[in-house]
Image (tube, rainbow, N blue to C red):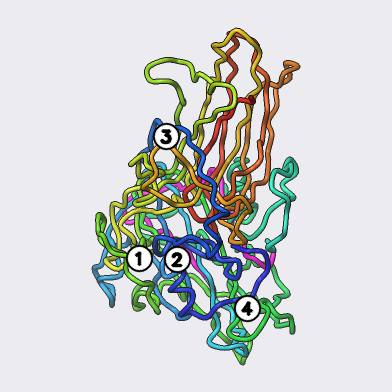
Amino acid sequence: MFSLLSFLSLANVLATPLSADTSLPWAEPIESAPLTAQAESTLITIPQEVRPLPGGLDSVPVFNSNSPEIIESDGILLSTFPSRGKSAPEAHLDYAFNGRFDIFSHHVARGQDDADTRTIYEGIIVHNPGSRPVTLSVREGASQISQESPWNQIASGSSNLYSNNFSGPGSRVMNDVLRDRRQSPLPDQLTLPPGESRLLLNAPIPLRRLSVATDGSLPPGSEILPAPVRVSSGEGPRLNGRSTLVRLHSSGPVYVASLAMHAPQVNGTERVPSLEDWKQVLFRGRLATPRDQPPSQPGSRANPFRYGRVSGVARGSQWKATLTDGRSDQLAIPKPGEQFSYGLSTLERNTFGTGQIQSAPIDARYSDTAYRANGNYGVEYNLDLPLTNNTGSAQTVSLSVQTPLQNDNLSDALQFYTSPSSRIFFRGTALFIYREDDGRSRAYYTYLEQSQGQQGQPLIEITLAPGEQRNVNFQFLYPPDATPPQVLTVSTQD
């Protein structure tokens, strides 16, 4: 998460703290983060109320494939297939999806050295174990790589009405799904005959420029021709990442697996893996290595506390809530000159004093992976704020997203840097739906970029007449390549 880019060694990747390092675009929450080395005089503490977020996650299961984040070898990334008949029974979680579910995947291909330009493929295979056909309906979905979703430098608060503002594959995929889009290579429907498997995704994560599409639309047997273009800068192995999010509905039970494979070769030329190639990995392969560092036990006092990366079935695709004062149907705005905030994507040891852990629980996982879906990557937040001015005069109210310093010991206060850190913690698109002061309805897509300890600028501003209530709807999908938590802040001008 960064601004562009020297790539780190695998040792540095695995040692990355809960942060978004400026030199590493694919940073993930690994351990609790220390403050950036800045003088104590640059800290500012703002006394204010910090509230837990009402509502909660739904019960939609999410196939969450994020460990190992770095792919170096062929193998199984995540499989919910039964273990029977497999060479590595421990690599299969025996979990069937039925009805609504999501598939989230976020991985980075890494060469053995700078000369290794072999193409690594990710395949997502779906299997019908039943005796009747199963229809798999794709509601929304997208898959992107960094070559086609470059790490752009974009001013925070820029309009993203036309989807032209993105930085990295994670932010681009979340923007597409936020707008209910389905990327064209993904099928509208996929029919699985009884006892058979089909590929939902068969897409490269290339370490060089390719002369063919990289969006999963390649037919089996297609050739990939090399061109002498570097993907990464600087010395060391090449890296490239792919982010994927698909929302689906299945008419019957299905098993899902995410697999990695170097492109097979014919006479020295790479070809696209076939379904049979992927079945060989599924049935004969083992968990992909090297593995990520294992997480700390929940409730542990370990320092640093390691969250680990996720590989399993999480529970929760959307957090939907109406933010009100207790049992009221209103949200009274702060007093003039004051503000209050709600935590977003809070996690263990980082709740801003609220004690609320929003990270999705995990129903099935590998023993060396995260106990919760820390960061809630791919989870949609859909929040209604019925803002109400209960004063006798007009009041101007603003909403902002902020990234306070991680400090769970503070009570009723948030801490920031007076000058933002260089470490970028959030890149992504948010949507505000509201009525402007002149009565016009507006759907405002805005691109956000937040650094560690950044207060953030007002994103929308409205003036409420005495006694007026006006609803603001706030939506975003938490992007990979981001570091939680953040807050949604409501402020009233002095």
Which residue is denoted by mark 2 in the rendering? 17
Which residue is painted at 56% across and 54% down in the image?
41
How far apart marks 3 and 4 lie (CA) works out to 41 Å
How far apart marks 4 and 1 lie (CA) works out to 33 Å
How far apart marks 4 and 2 lie (CA) works out to 26 Å
Q: Position of residue 429 (x, y in %)?
A: 63, 45
Which residue is painted at 63% across and 29% down in the image?
398
Which badge, 3 or 4, is on the more N-terminal residue?
3
Mark 1 surroundings within 10 Å by alpha-carbon count, few (fewer than 14), some (14 through 19), many (20 or more): some
Would you say residue 204 is visible in this rendering? no
Mark 3 surroundings within 10 Å by alpha-carbon count, few (fewer than 14), some (14 through 19), many (20 or more): many
Which badge, 4 or 2, is on the more N-terminal residue?
2
Identify which residue, 69 or 94, lies in the foreground.
Answer: 69
Please, what secondary structure does the residue beneath circle 3 have?
loop
How far apart marks 2 and 3 lie (CA) works out to 25 Å
Question: Is residue 271 shown left or right of residue 147?
Answer: left
Report the magenta residues as a range.
122-148
Q: Is residue 127 magenta?
A: yes
Which badge, 1 or 3, is on the more N-terminal residue?
3
Which residue is denoted by mark 1 in the rendering? 304
Which residue is denoted by mark 4 in the rendering? 207
Which residue is denoted by mark 3 in the rendering? 53
* Tag count: 4
Please, what secondary structure does the residue beneath circle 2 have?
loop
Q: Is residue 368 magenta?
A: no
Identify which residue, 258 or 400, lies in the foreground.
Answer: 400
